[in-house]
Amino acid sequence: MTHPSPRPGTNAGNRGVPPRMGARVAAAPPRNYGAMAAGILFIASALFALLRVTLLKDVLPTEATPGQVYGLASVFVAVGIALVQGSTIARRTVMALATLGLLLVLAGLFFVVEHEELGTLVWFVAAAIVTIPYLALLALLLGEQPSWLRVGIGATVLAAFSFGSYGLEAAAQRQIERQWVERIAEWTAKETSFADPKLGLAITPPDEWVLLDAASDPVAREGGRVGLADRRSLALAILQVEELTDGPGTPRAHLDRIRNAHVKAQDELEELGVEPVSVGGTDGQKLTARFRSKGQRMRGWFVAWRDGWRYFALFGWVPEDRADAGARAFSALVSKIGFTPVLSRDFDELRRAVEEIAPHLSPAAIRAVMDRHPGRKLTAGQVFRLTHRASVEGIAALSAAEKDELGRLTGVLFGQLSARDRARLGSYQERVRFDQAVKPGEDAEMALVMKAGTVRMPPESLVRLQALYEKAIAIGALMDKTG
């Protein structure tokens, strides 16, 4: 015999049984106000950290990058919300991580105290200080229903330590800034601008930038030609000038050279990018990087440009927590550098004079020789003689095919000359080869004799002659020990 299925709302199977009149309904679990207070503090701490990299970044700067702060803040907010919602898992996880963190901090403090030989008492004092906020956090998270007194004391202590540390940090930062302002005042030179026509340099610093005395510590330590400091961002900058016979061959190599001179590999160098920059109308390059100096995170800028064999480098740096203000100040400084090439202007004039009497020499071949003789005033005839001596040294490094081609082209050139001129030019080249004396004016005279042969060569042959001579001269110039 079948039984009808129970209708909804009946007592069959004790399912769907409506409560009887007057029956007690199970009460919701009580709120854990300790966990709620801890969660609110986590969220507040995250929001304050975000303010430090946005609205308060100039008032209370931090070495942490925005990306690092955003990541940590998102974790704090998530944990805070879970605690406010009463998650037991979140509460236990926070207590476990806090305990592990405390143990690691205590171990680190012990290592520092032992290394610095500060004594056991110092460790106990430091340990007590870092343990207090840990105990306050436990007071909020231990138990399901902590008393209001425990919640009040725990929240007050934890908030005082969390936000009071920012106040101490700000006070310490202000003290450091005051010390730097005093140092900059001690280093400041009487002059308000810099100019050196021989270098083609003129600097009128923007507002808040001052020139530093040549004997001041930053300038003397870095071997700078000019030192500058920004009193607002506390950025420092050093301008260096070098005359190098064998200088960096490319702009990037120049940047790498000055970077390596100021920042070592163990300083955790992190390059942030290279960009073109104009220095007084001259093309240069600017490298931005992060690095550590004496344990402090720093932001640095390296600007490089050149004038012939004269190499210029402007290096600026500032603590990472003031990087934004320092970057603006450094860019303003670069824009105030007036620069007029001196050596390049002289080179262009000499290059045109050499090409006029020796069309077989390319601009690169002429520069290869001039770069070996920085500061020496050369005539077009002297450049002709030096390029020939360099080519003799460099021909040995050419390939067999290149030597054969150069010999054939030289034969064509000599074939365009009279017998008398061939003999004169050959005698002159032999004397130059063995560094023997030549008569005054003979360099330019023999250059014109050779030109008489090159102008009669087919254009494609002259182009190949220039290319082979350029290669041989570039190699031979590096082998020249007289530069």
Image (cartoon, helix red, strand yellow):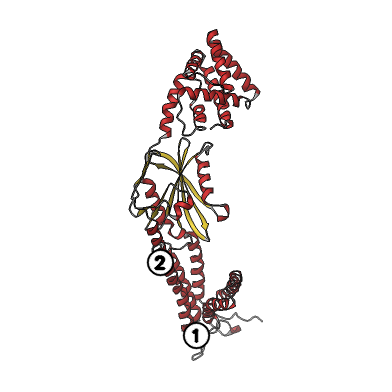
Q: Hey, what amino acid is under mark 1?
A: Arg
- Tell me if residue 329 comes above or below residue 449 in the rendering: below
Q: How many marks?
A: 2
Please state the horizontal and vertical placement of residue 115, each as a whole percent of the image: 60, 69
- Which quadrant: the N terminus? bottom right
Residue bearing the label numbered 1: 150
Please state the horizontal and vertical placement of residue 375, each as a whole percent of the image: 46, 34
In primary-sequence order, the first of circles 1 and 2 is: 1
Q: Which mark is residue 38?
A: none
Please state the horizontal and vertical placement of residue 180, each as a whole percent of the image: 41, 61
Left or right, 31 with reference to 118: left
Residue bearing the label numbered 2: 174
Q: CA distance from mark 1 to mark 2?
A: 36 Å
Q: Hey, what amino acid is under mark 2?
A: Arg
Question: Element at badge 2?
Answer: helix
Question: Element at badge 1?
Answer: helix
Q: Nearer the viewer, residue 224 or 250?
A: 224
